[in-house]
């Protein structure tokens, strides 16, 4: 986080994707070093406490608002990835004008009807996730070269292993348990945000990966059309994991957007 004399305004409030932690924003923050950069751990992730299920995604928006209040971050720019982008949108709908603008990498927002999906492919995948290793080195070896980590930068993958796990006894254990991640996915289709995207008045920049199989370019273009003021940028060669694969490119895109807010 950059702070103090010489820091450009507005600053950035970053929210990670499901299953991740705030430290994965490190390379993006480094590239935006002249801006105050604050990243939070979503509930049940990183160093945040895990809530009792079910998880209401609107509470994720309220978590963002709580951080805004606690850190004095009103009128900053939100930077979110996947569920983190959704959390920022929910915060802005709950309290319009909180954020000056939004840079959202494939936020989890889909057309209705809204419903809680108790069983879905993402939930099943999360529940099958290996949750512990004998050491950080074993975890790193296991992830390197395997989807979705194969295209991550070494720095981001190292940060995930170092900060996304904690030592429990003689094991290296995920901070975000498979069950917590699965619970996130169960509620991903229940928030009904799609029908309220027109309420988001601040400028929005949507960012998608050219090779994404989560929200490919046509889906992102359809999402863009739901906003009052939104642009779309597609990152060549990237998948859904733009912040982990091309952090410098994302930082450049975000910086150009932020400069343009006052232009």
Image (cartoon, helix red, strand yellow):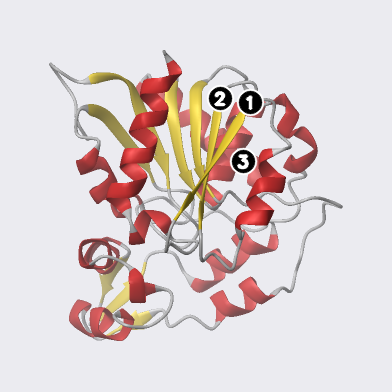
Name the residue tied to disc 2: 203
The quarter of the picture where the N terminus appears is top left
Q: Quadrant of residue 153?
A: bottom left
Residue placed furthest toward the left: 5
The vertical placement of 28 against 159, above or below, is: above
Q: Secondary structure at mark 3?
A: helix
- On residue 11, the disc is none
Q: Residues within 10 Å of mark 3 (few under 14, many from 20)?
A: some
Residue at 20% over, 20% down: 7
Contact, CB < 8 Å: mark 3 with mark 2?
Answer: no
Residue at 42% over, 64% down: 237
Q: Nearer the viewer, residue 75 or 56?
A: 75
Contact, CB < 8 Å: mark 1 with mark 2?
Answer: yes
Name the residue tied to disc 3: 59
Q: Secondary structure at mark 1?
A: loop
Image location (x, y in percent) of residue 258: 39, 25
Left/right placement of residue 128 relative to residue 40 reads right
Image location (x, y in percent) of residue 137: 18, 81
The vertical placement of 163 against 192, above or below, is: below
Q: Nearer the viewer, mark 1 or mark 3?
A: 1
Whole-number angstrom distance, CA of label 1 to CA of label 3: 25 Å
Q: Quadrant of residue 145?
A: bottom left
Image location (x, y in percent) of residue 98: 53, 20
Q: Nearer the viewer, residue 98 or 240?
A: 240
Image location (x, y in percent) of residue 166: 28, 67
Q: Residues within 10 Å of mark 1 (few under 14, many from 20)?
A: some
């Amino acid at each position: 986080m950059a702070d103090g004399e010489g820091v450009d305004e507005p600053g950035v409030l970053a929210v990670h994707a499901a299953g991740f932690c705030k430290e994965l924003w490190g390379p993006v923050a480094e590239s935006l070093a002249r801006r105050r950069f604050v990243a939070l751990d979503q509930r049940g992730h990183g160093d945040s406490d895990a809530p009792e299920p079910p998880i209401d995604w609107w509470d994720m928006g309220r978590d963002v608002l709580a951080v805004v209040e606690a850190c004095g971050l009103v009128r900053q720019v939100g930077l979110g990835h996947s569920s983190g982008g959704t959390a920022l949108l929910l915060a802005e709908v709950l309290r319009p004008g909180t954020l000056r603008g939004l840079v959202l990498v494939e936020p989890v927002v889909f057309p209705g009807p809204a419903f809680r999906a108790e069983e879905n492919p993402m939930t099943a995948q999360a529940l099958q996730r290996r949750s512990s290793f004998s050491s950080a080195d074993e975890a790193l070896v296991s992830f390197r070269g395997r989807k979705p980590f194969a295209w991550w930068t070494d720095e981001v993958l190292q940060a995930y292993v170092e900060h996304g796990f904690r030592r429990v006894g003689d094991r290296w254990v995920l901070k975000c348990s498979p069950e917590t991640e699965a619970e996130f996915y169960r509620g991903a289709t229940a928030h009904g945000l799609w029908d309220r995207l027109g309420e988001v008045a601040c400028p929005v920049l949507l960012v998608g990966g050219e090779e994404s199989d989560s929200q490919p370019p046509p889906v992102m273009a359809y999402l863009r059309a739901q906003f009052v003021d939104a642009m779309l940028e597609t990152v060549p060669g990237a998948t859904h994991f733009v912040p982990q694969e091309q952090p410098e490119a994302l930082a450049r895109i975000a910086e150009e957007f932020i400069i343009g807010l006052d232009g």
